[in-house]
Image: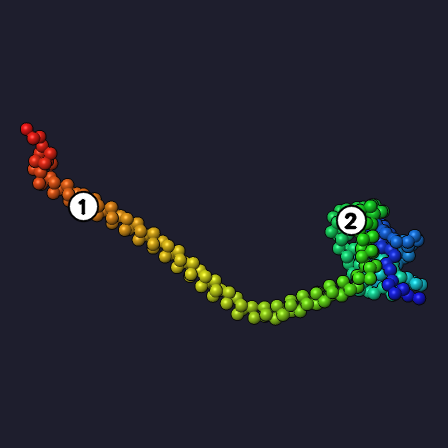
Amino acid sequence: MQSSNPQIIYAVVVRGSNVVLSEYSIAKGNYIAFAKTIISKVNQQNAKKSFNYEQYEFHILVEDGFSFLIMAERGLKMRIAFACLEDMKQKFFQMFQPQQRDQAISYGLNSQFSIEQKNKIEYYNSPQADKLRLVSDNIQQTKEVMMENLDKLLERGEKIDILVEKTNVMVNISTSMKENATTLRRQMWWRNKKMTIILVLVGLLAIYIIMVIACGGFAMHRCFGSSD
């Protein structure tokens, strides 16, 4: 009899066909023997498969020679199983560099990654996991529709490019006009300033010449001479 909320019992990461890097289980059992048998049957660099054995299911995701496998009770929804595997895979590749993954000895990554496997199992065993997954799928579908609409819009890319180009030209013209107006104002200010200085100097010179003539020469004896 299937459980109303089938549980993920076991998770393992294997390099190649037999190097176990990390595993975690919520119950005791010799699960690795079943896991290695299934991995040897897949024997591919990249694959996604499911197997049934008695009251259990085995789901496996293989990428670049690394196998991510979970064992669950019968009836676990496929989208939950492979969402869990995808999560584990992404976390694994995020945590470990290629050299670490390729050179780690058997169970060499267990102390670091088994806690991640535990967290993923607990999360996907939650009754809310499927609801959250459905919401996530709906969001993804919406994003795909938006991207599709954007692709259709970009088919008219030539018109868009022209519009953008014209807009940029108008912006450049406006900026240039503002810069020219500022420059012109500065030039007019300096021109007026120079004209004022010249007029003042000419006025002072005219006054000096008049005083020279009126006062009897450059010595200006008539105006500033001695009273004796």
Q: Amino acid at mark 2?
A: Arg
Between 97 and 132, which is closer to the camera in this rendering? 132
- Which one is in front in this view, the residue at disc 1 or the one at disc 2? 1
In the picture, measured across the screen, residue 25 lies left or right of residue 130, that is right
Report x, y in % for residue 43.
84, 58
- Residue 136 quadrant: bottom right
In the picture, measured across the screen, residue 3 lies left or right of residue 90, that is right
- The C terminus, quarter of image: top left
Report x, y in % for residue 85.
80, 58
- Residue 139 quadrant: bottom right
Residue furthest to the front in view is 227
For mark 1, what is the residue? 203
Q: Residue at x 83, y 52 (%)?
A: 118
Mark 1 surroundings within 10 Å by alpha-carbon count, few (fewer than 14), some (14 through 19), many (20 or more): few
- Residue 225 quadrant: top left
| Count of numbered circles on the image | 2
Residue 48 in sight here: no
Q: Can you tell which mark lies on residue 101? A: 2
